[in-house]
Image (spheres, rainbow, N blue to C red):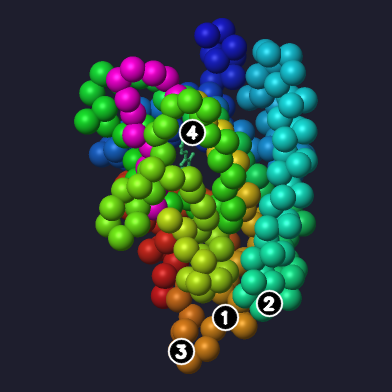
Amino acid sequence: MVEKQKHGRAGDDYEGYGNDLVLFENQPLDWTDRLYLLVSPEDRQKLNYWPENPESFRYVLREYIARLKQIQEQLLKSIAMSLSLPEDCFLNQFGERSTMYARFNYYPPCSRPDLVFGLKPHADGSGITILLQDKEVKGLQLLKDDKWFWVPIMPDALLIMSNGILKSPIHRAVTNSETERNTLAMFYSPDPEKEIEPLEELVDDERPRLFTKVRNYPDTYFHFYQRGKRPINAVRI
Ligand SMILES: O=C(O)CCC(=O)C(=O)O
Ligand SMILES: [Fe+2]
């Protein structure tokens, strides 16, 4: 408890431990507490939000980040090649100062799981999300053909850069009345200063350009998401 308070989210900062930022009066609220940290680039880390207890926390998180970076870069290259594109084309749009956020989700048991979501339905705004699931408690559902299935997740920035070829599926986390549940989502996104847009190679007469140029999509994303709206519509042409 003391540790949680010490690293609590302050004012209108996104980072830290606590609830999500409440931006609008009628914003649907979620049954979750989370520790949200910008972990990369390193010079943007706000260490005052990083727990010191357990002692190994910072070290383990840094190790995890380093490994995930390699996986994410490899994934971006492989996806590019699977679309017959130059292997660095997505990586170039992510830029040297691409960002990674860690979101530790804590879902306490909820006496009325029929009334509230752990996380309301959404599609992530990141390019790639890697989710470490709770080992025992299920909770994540994915929307496909208007039905909810119990499965893992994925992106939105790639939806823009790939001109809609790569989809960012809608998912939600549900609550249950018996057990708490913990997950860790790592969001890998382009440098907020860099403009991203559909790759020219993926735009033609048959597949006209679907999205505008956008800078700092996560910022647009949060404003729409917290109203329960689909953020991707903000950049659709
Ligand atoms: O906790 C989960 O299973 C999903 C988490 C999630 O969708 C998110 O943090 O964006
Ligand atoms: Fe998500």
Element class at badge 2:
loop
Task: Point out the stretch of residues depicted in magenta.
Answer: 170-181
On the image, the x and y values in percent for residue 64 come to 72, 35
Where 172 falls versus 205 (above or below)? above
Q: Are marks 4 and 3 in contact (CB under 8 Å)?
A: no
Alpha-carbon span between mark 1 and mark 2: 9 Å
Residue 85 disc label: 2
Q: Quadrant of residue 196?
A: bottom right
Figure quadrant of residue 38 = top right
Q: CA distance from mark 3 to mark 2?
A: 18 Å
Three-letter code for the amino acid on which mark 2 is drawn: Leu
Query: Residue at horizontal 62%, vertical 83%?
Result: 201
Disc on the earlier residue, 4 or 3: 4
Residue, x 46% and y 84% (percent of image)?
208
Is disc 1 surrounded by few (<14), some (14 to 19) or many (20+) residues within 10 Å? some
The residue tagged 1 is 202
The correct choice, above or below, for 125 with respect to 138 in the image is below
Spatial CA span between label 4 and label 3? 44 Å
How many neighbours does mark 2 have within 10 angstroms: few (below 14), some (14-19), or many (20 or more)? Answer: some
Going from the N terminus, do you reach mark 1 or mark 2 first? 2
